[in-house]
Amino acid sequence: MKIEGRHTVPAPQETVWQRLNDPSVLERSLPGVERLEPDGPDRYRASIKYKVGAVSGSFSGSVELSEKNPPHSMRLKTSARGVPGFVTGEGKLELVPKGAETEVVYSGELQLGGLLAAIGSRMVESAAKKSIEDFFKSLASS
Amino acid sequence: MIPAAFEYFAPKSLDDALRLVERHGDEAKLLAGGQSLIPLMKLRLSVPRYVVDIGRIRSLRSIREEGGWLVIGALSTHHDVESSEMVRLMAPLLAETASEIGDVQVRNRGTIGGSLSHSDPAADYPAAMLALDAQIVAASSSGTRTIHASEFFLDLMTTQLRPGEILTEVRIPRLPERSGSAYRKLHQPASGFALAGAAVRVSLDEVGKIASAAIGITGVAVRPFRASGAEAMLAGKKPSPKLLADASEKVADGVEPLADIHASAAYRRAAASVYARRALEAALARAEGEKG
Amino acid sequence: MATATKLIGKPIKRKEDPRLVQGIAHYVDDLTLPGMLHLGIVRSPYAHARVRSVDVSKALAAPGVVAVLTAEDVQGAIAPIPCAAQIPDMKPAPRPVLATNEVRFVGEGVAAVVAADRYALRDAMDLVEVDYEPLPAVVDLEKALRKDSPRVHDGLADNAAYHWALEGGDVKKAFKQADRVVKLRMLNQRLIPVAMEPRAVLAQYDRGDNRLTLWSSSQIPHILRTQIAAMLNFPEYGVYVIVPEVGGGFGSKLNVYPEEALACHLAIKLEKPVKWNEGRRENFLSTIHGRGESCDMELAVKRDGTILGMRARVLADLGAYYQLLTPLIPTLTGLMICGCYRIQNLSVEITGVLTNKMATDAYRGAGRPEATYFVERAMDAVAAELKIDPAELRRKNFPKPKDFPYATATGLIYDTANYQGALELALKKSGYKALRRQQAALRKKGRLLGIGLSSYVEICALGPSSAMPAGGWESATIRIEPTGRVRVLTGSSPHGQGEETSFSQIAADMLGVGLDDVIIVHGDTSAVPYGIGTFGSRTLAVGGTAIYRCCEKLRDKLLKIAGHLMQEDPAKLVLRAKQIVSKRDPKKSISFAETVGAAYTAKTLPPGVEPGLEATHFYEPSNFTFPFGTHVAVVEVDRETGEVKLVKYVAVDDCGNLINPLLVEGQVQGGIVQSIGQAMLEEAVYDDQGQLLTGELMDYAIPRAADVPKLETFHTVTPTPVNPMGVKGVGEAGTIGATPALVNAVVDALAPFGVRHLDMPLKRERVWKAIHQAPSESAGRPRRSK
Ligand SMILES: Cc1cc2nc3c(=O)[nH]c(=O)nc-3n(C[C@H](O)[C@H](O)[C@H](O)COP(=O)(O)OP(=O)(O)OC[C@H]3O[C@@H](n4cnc5c(N)ncnc54)[C@H](O)[C@@H]3O)c2cc1C
């Protein structure tokens, strides 16, 4: 499924870029991520705990940044795999300066597998959108 | 379809239950009718370490009148609500809504407290709660608090309830005179949940104008909502087919509808309008019936 | 028939029902054996991936776990799933019982875990760690056939499993002579069979006797026995397959599955009974699916509605691997594609397409519902374009009763029919003319009533062995026991259809005994003679005929013995009400009991007659049978929401003589309900990565009682000359005849909007879109209802 949208972060482009490249910020901002460990250049191993209402689960996954064009754009790939299946998200982030603020435009694909695809597609899509929102909110306050 | 191992408690009193959920916090799950929780546990999408079965707390299963309010205990099943004379008299919208939930087995097990706490975006009760301006009472070891329905539903399967709290009852205010209500729902053909559900309450004034209207919409977005734009259009006006149609067109304005294999966002929006209009028509007919 | 008919033709209640409704019947999962272990399959969450490694160490160390197997452990020990279908130049796509290096559909097994109880098993399954490297998935049929498509199977040149073509008459000429060519592209969507009882398997091995017993919820106990013996290289005489009660199959249990072989292998290896049973989600993922065919059809027509010729190009979604009959099913669509019409100029091309999905195979109707749907939809498109009433168009193109036996352009010989007779009865019973008037009146008010017809012919009683992959005959052994009770052993394997009752009716009438004097034994390969199984609407027409013929043998023997005792010519005797009576002098009789007794005491047998009363018959039919009928559906569409309400349904079916009208009624009604499912609700939805999105009954909608109005069923009776009872088969008629009638009705309702075709399932949103995006303005803006 396609995921796209835009978010305004109240910080200059350069700052937003730095935050996106700072593993400690990512660890704090990526929803559900409990730990992020380096796993090669621009690549991290993640352990994720997820909870929406009565639904919860543990996943292990990865975060990967690529095609970096500082401070304008990059690709972000995340994947998480656990007992109920897997989620991978891959997309492009563009940072557009808007005065003192930065608009982050994202577009990408979300792929669910296993039980998550079969049972939860409606929920997971909504949950993913919420997660992205939470991510940007958290990025703003980092 | 076997849940992960968990420890099971079956407290007989609310206090005992509150103590247990306080002690185990996030790792505990309350079990009421089990119609939402057990399937999730069997799929291991929910893996609580402790399950606190509140089904034996008799005091939570009651339907009564209290100072003009209809008070429904959290453990009242959908069937209890659907078949209660008192509910039919004081809040017929709730009885009608309960009768539209799932199937007989689900209605015999599922509870109003469980449905509201779980807050599935396609659940039926939330629409009625909003339309009836219900109050939701939550208890914790530090006391109880009352939450207005319009503030209760926060996000996808997320409510005002905090870990350690138990929803104990729902309180419905008395309807104004010359009121009518109706629930209309487009069923998801497989699960029976609402792809779009509209719960409507309208009240007329002496000259037959709409004094106020309340429209709760479920199934359409990540959380249920009041169609306040449509309500405002109706208030103070003489009902006419055109008015109802125009107001109904607006019910999903400003919300981002869900989309899945059962219905696109556009279809959910359109269905919400049609079902809201049909609910309005039925509610008005009932309100007018009351007048005579 | 020499005996007076008393039970045949009567609506006798099912003998099998008391035990079923009381809950005292036994299904596989009701069986428990001492020391029994439980098997679970760890399945792939990817539609296509390389399996880099499978780490079973944590699972093996978990409490209660007895064994964990991967592909390596069974390599050489268990052969792949057999496929009985042979199509020239078919590419190989055998399914290993556990995925070897690649997984090719979501749900494919990668490891088998065995534990002491189901709880330990479930926990341990989560501990098997599989490292997958995702590969691109092949999902869409058209895309799958492109040159640049990824391959489902690496070694194959492309994803086309085979091309199968058939040509009859002179198609080019027909299209040249046509006034018009009507084209339609249609999809007959992939469905999930949803038998009420999912599959279940229990295997037990006795080392002392070298005896392997397999209980399975199956439609084909003997074929299963043979195939399991072959897959495990185990002597077939040591394999005992027992099929206890089966909670529905619809074709999904006409197969051999990995779990059957794995449970047997493990039972032998561990010397403990091993049970596996399927959850609903597993059932959706890894039990065969049905249908999944798309068709581009062109009909060459004359202005008066005469169909001159047909071209059809069918793409069939086979899935990733072949199950028992996978490649064969679409060819049945090809054989039946011209339906009940005189279309002698024809070309059909079928391409079997490999995709990263569960295999398709026989699902109630198996190829014929697709054929009927395609031709019946196309007939309605012709009627609409030529502005001819759909009933009139059909009438015009039917072969006449005198034309039978009728040779089709596809090489079949239709046995006998009166298509128009069935059509006229359906029109009369539905009040067709009045319905059309009502439709016109309602349209003026903005209401959308639709009337849909479907005339069908199907191919049943499968079939002569020459046309079947593994024999088309059926067997019966009948023993009249010394007390006079009759034990009928059948090679068929009824699983809900009610043949314990209809077979009893046949045997009782033939032997002049009561219904309760007869017991029907089936499904136990050590008790009954080898048989083919229950599918293809064959059980009564082939299995029942075997019983009929077998009864004739016993009857002749009884009459011989009685004649000897009575000093009467056996040719002058009849069996009736437990008496053997002289036709010349009805007062002259001897009791059935006495005659049976004489056969066993063997003191006064006629010369040359062996003692005992047992006979066996293997019946080989000379042809298929071709039941037919016309169904009429009436729907009303809610123009605001696209909801379709079925308001009336009339079915006229001709399945030849009716042995038990109540059973026929049950089959017809059940089939129509499944058609409602296909037409309105059901679809196995895979996303573009091959994930099954309708993975549960919460998302895969099947019809419920409330969706079904009273179904009015009628019959014309045109007995087949193919078998002595004149019976044809009715098990699949409903799913074949009803689907197009329903869709035709909805498309007819939407005619004011210029809608020509809609693909199934006719979900509300699809209908709503058709109304709201209609190009035609003739219907005006949808009005609001008051
Ligand atoms: C086949 C099927 C069809 C259904 N169809 C519909 C439908 O059409 N419409 C509809 O609205 N619903 C439907 N449902 C859901 C049903 O209404 C459930 O009963 C309801 O969602 C949950 O109520 P429960 O009592 O079963 O709660 P449980 O499953 O026991 O609990 C659900 C959640 O709420 C929490 N909880 C329960 N009680 C309390 C409490 N008092 N205080 C705090 N937390 C609590 C639990 O911890 C859990 O997280 C369906 C369910 C099924 C299985």
Image (cartoon, coloured by chain):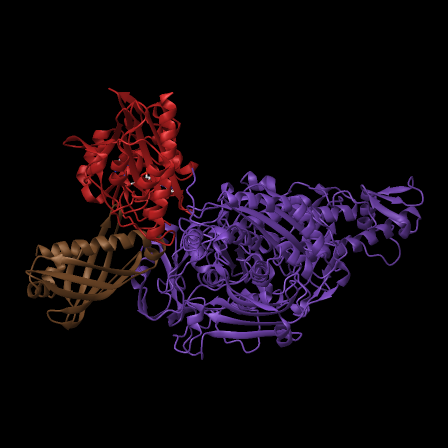
Chain colours: A brown, B red, C purple
Q: Nearer the viewer, residue C631 or C653?
A: C631
Q: Looking at the image, is B193 positioned above or below residue C350?
A: above
- Give the residue at x 89% y 57%: C607
* Residue C648 appearing in the image: yes
Q: How many marks?
A: 0
Q: Residue C236 in the image: state x and y as whole percent.
A: 59, 65
Q: Looking at the image, is C242 positioned above or below residue B246?
A: below
| Picture quadrant of ligand 1 | top left
Is B160 displayed left or right of C656 in the figure? left
Q: Residue B166 in the image: state x and y as whole percent.
A: 22, 35
Is C746 displayed left or right of B158 in the figure? right
Which quadrant holds the C terminus of chain C? top left
Q: Looking at the image, is A65 positioned above or below residue B56?
A: below
Q: Nearer the viewer, residue C99 or C687?
A: C687
Q: Residue C681 in the image: state x and y as whole percent.
A: 47, 51
- Give the residue at x 86% y 59%: C608
Is C495 displayed left or right of C482 in the figure? left
- Give the residue at x 34% y 44%: B272
Q: Looking at the image, is B204 positioned above or below residue B41?
A: above
Identify the image quadrant of residue C54: bottom left
